[in-house]
Image (cartoon, rainbow, N blue to C red):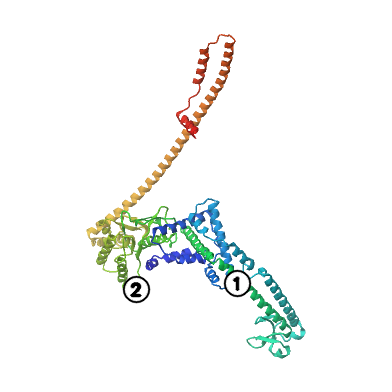
């Protein structure tokens, strides 16, 4: 696998990710990264990256600053070693950083209701450890210095130190300003030697000056002397500084003991932080290369849409479409050199390794890749000088090794298969090798310039031809991969374009047998047919999209019309019903009056009153079927 990672430039890709790492913790994760061969593990890694991408899309950035790999600090504290002030500061900073990151993710999930199941699970494992963080911050400043306020004793000692230093400087200032001593000094300054305050005295005044000599200049012309007047105070200062060191050490030991108590929790935090830092490095890299999450399978099927090689810049790379493992398991890319065949091969190989490493890949949405148990590659001229092997021998040695390990769960990449030897024998060997790999069920992508392999793909089930398009007008490859069309020689067309005499070209054509000419004509026809089919397909797609859009619009308009019709009917019926209701109420009053008249002996017949009522009921508006169903549903609800 190491050789495959090297030839497919996996390490160069990792160097690009390194730019997005925030801490040494994430860097350690990156250094350990290798492709997995287990589908479940790869899917989990891809979900991690997808959540990182989601967070960056919604928030723009993640609080990952101020975290350090304090694993060694925690372990040393646990076995009784003393941590320095700067190491304790790193511990406190890491505790704060982990607490801030945990709050950031949990707020997104709990309060903003953003689905991040993997990241949420990780941060839930982080211990807050606030007490230890506060204890350290109360004693040590941001520059890793123990504060005066760390203990009352330290404050008192440091006040003494300042007092002694002030007294010494005062005495020495008086000395160097004295007119009697100024002529004896090399310079009127106060300096320090052996942690004692001294002044520079000329060599010739040594005996006249007195005091203790602590050092001399390189030339010996100047002696650094501690005057007798400050010896006692310097001794007191030295003693006070000794007390300060012992008190600082006591404070550091006390804080180290607190770290020792939470050492295991701290190591857990560091592990989680490293994992999360790496997740967001992958996410930032995905954004940089405009990558998407691939679909995954373990059936050996790949379908790459507009795939780009991540190490090539945008103006260099041409997206390619590659399909393999369904209708055909071997793809034979033929055509002249410098046409982009090797780039295609490396793109397929590197994107496979990236996907199996949990990285998003530079392809369009819905692209799919297989998780292979083994990936093999024989790419480029890896001639071994030490073994004095020829190019052919070097490639064949590698191919022999591949054939001894390949199986149905393998992806095999061959570059210029059979090259470096007699063309007839080389082509025959290439066909035999491809047949052997195919019989074992492996997926294969092979490049070759042998014309014999063009026919091979037509005569074998499960094998497909492909080529990289070449523009004869510009004399440059377009780097566009054409599946189903073998590469053809453009030597005559290029020569004609460059001005070679027509008669020479015609005589050259006569040297080629009719079968080869027929094949070349067939390939040219295939290219034309494919371009025409692609053009017609694109036009059909445009028309289909327009028709689909029109269908949707008409459907929406019809739906809107039906709603409006129902609304107007309902309004009309409600209005009519209201009018009838009002008439009913008025009629009821009249009927009551008629009954009263009847009681008073006036001639009003009963059946006339009943008929009047019946006519009123029949005058009420009838609901439509839809409204009846709607009202029935509402009454049930």
Identify the disc placed on residue 382.
Answer: none
Give the mark nearer the N terminus: 1 vs 2.
Answer: 1
Residue 429 in the image, given as x and y percentages of width and height: 26, 65
Residue 438 in the image, given as x and y percentages of width and height: 28, 60
Please name which of the two marks, 1 or 2, marks the residue nearer to the observer.
1
Q: Residues within 10 Å of mark 2 (few under 14, many from 20)?
A: few
Q: Residue at x 72, y 78 (%)?
A: 169
Residue 231 in the image, given as x and y percentages of width and height: 71, 83
Q: Which residue is mark 1?
A: 253
State how many labels appear.
2
**Viewed as shown, does residue 44 lie left or right of 105?**
left
Q: Residue at x 26, y 68 (%)?
A: 422
Q: Is residue 203 visible?
A: yes
Quadrant housing residue 47: bottom left
Q: Nearer the viewer, residue 408 or 119?
A: 119
Residue 93 in the image, given as x and y percentages of width and height: 58, 65
Q: Which residue is mark 2?
A: 384
Secondary element under disc 1, as helix, strand or loop, is helix
Q: Identify the residue at the far right of this view.
A: 179
Quadrant housing residue 403: bottom left
Q: Residue at x 71, y 87 (%)?
A: 211
Quadrant holding the N terminus: bottom left
**Viewed as shown, does residue 269 lie left or right of 303?**
right
Q: Is residue 290 visible?
A: no
């Amino acid at each position: 696998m190491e050789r495959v990672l090297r030839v497919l430039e996996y390490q160069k890709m990792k160097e690009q990710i390194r730019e997005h790492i925030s801490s040494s913790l994430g860097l350690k994760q990156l250094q350990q990264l290798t492709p997995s061969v287990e589908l479940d593990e790869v899917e989990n890694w891809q979900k991690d990256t997808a959540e990182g991408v989601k967070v960056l899309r919604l928030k723009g950035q993640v609080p990952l600053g101020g975290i350090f790999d304090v694993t060694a600090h925690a372990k040393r504290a646990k076995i009784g070693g003393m941590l320095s002030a700067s190491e304790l500061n790193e511990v406190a900073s890491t505790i704060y950083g982990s607490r801030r990151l945990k709050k950031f993710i949990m707020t997104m999930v709990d309060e903003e209701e953003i689905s991040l199941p993997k990241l949420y699970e990780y941060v839930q494992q982080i211990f807050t450890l606030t007490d230890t963080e506060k204890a350290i911050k109360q004693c040590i400043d941001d520059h890793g210095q123990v504060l005066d306020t760390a203990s009352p004793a330290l404050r008192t000692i440091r006040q003494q130190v300042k007092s002694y230093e002030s007294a010494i400087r005062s005495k020495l200032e008086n000395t160097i300003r004295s007119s009697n001593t100024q002529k004896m000094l090399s310079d009127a300054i106060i300096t320090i030697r052996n942690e004692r305050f001294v002044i520079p005295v000329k060599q010739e005044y040594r005996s006249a000056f007195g005091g203790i000599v602590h050092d001399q200049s390189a030339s010996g012309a100047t002696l650094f002397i501690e005057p007798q007047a400050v010896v006692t105070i310097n001794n007191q200062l030295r003693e006070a500084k000794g007390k300060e060191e012992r008190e600082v050490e006591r404070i550091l030991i006390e804080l180290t003991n607190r770290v020792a108590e939470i050492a295991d929790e701290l190591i857990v935090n560091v592990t989680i932080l490293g994992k999360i830092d790496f997740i967001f490095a992958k996410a930032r890299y995905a954004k940089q290369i405009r990558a998407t999450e691939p679909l995954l399978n373990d059936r050996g099927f790949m379908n790459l849409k507009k795939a780009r090689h991540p190490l090539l810049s945008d103006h260099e790379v041409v997206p390619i479409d590659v399909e393999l493992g369904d209708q055909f398991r071997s793809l034979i890319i033929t055509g002249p050199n410098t046409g982009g065949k090797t780039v295609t091969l490396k793109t397929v190989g590197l994107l496979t390794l990236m996907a199996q490493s949990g990285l998003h890949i530079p392809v369009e949405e819905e692209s799919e890749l297989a998780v292979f148990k083994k990936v093999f590659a024989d790419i480029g001229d890896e001639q071994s000088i030490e073994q004095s092997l020829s190019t052919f021998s070097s490639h064949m040695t590698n191919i022999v090794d591949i054939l001894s390990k390949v199986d149905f769960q393998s992806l095999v990449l061959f570059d210029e298969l059979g090259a470096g030897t007699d063309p007839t024998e080389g082509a025959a060997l290439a066909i035999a090798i491809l047949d052997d790999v195919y019989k074992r069920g492996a997926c294969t992508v092979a490049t070759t310039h042998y014309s014999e392999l063009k026919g091979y793909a037509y005569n074998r089930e499960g094998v497909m031809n492909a080529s990289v398009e070449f523009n004869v007008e510009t004399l440059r490859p377009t780097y566009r991969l054409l599946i189903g069309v073998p590469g053809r020689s453009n030597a005559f067309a290029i020569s004609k374009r460059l001005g070679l005499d027509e008669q020479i070209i015609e005589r050259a054509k006569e040297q080629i047998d009719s079968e080869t000419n027929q094949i070349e004509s067939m390939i040219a026809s295939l290219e034309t047919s494919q371009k025409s089919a692609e053009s017609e397909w694109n036009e059909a797609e445009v028309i289909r999209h327009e028709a689909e859009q029109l269908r949707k619009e008409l459907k929406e308009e019809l739906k809107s019309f039906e709603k409006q019709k129902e609304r107007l009917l309902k309004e009309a019926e409600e209005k009519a019903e209201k009018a009838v209701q009002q008439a009913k109420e008025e009629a009821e009053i009249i009927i009551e009056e008629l009954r009263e008249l009847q009681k008073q002996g006036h001639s009003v017949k009963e059946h006339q009153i009943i008929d009047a009522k019946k006519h009123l009921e029949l005058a009420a508006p009838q609901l439509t079927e839809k409204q009846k169903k709607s009202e029935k549903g509402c009454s049930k609800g």
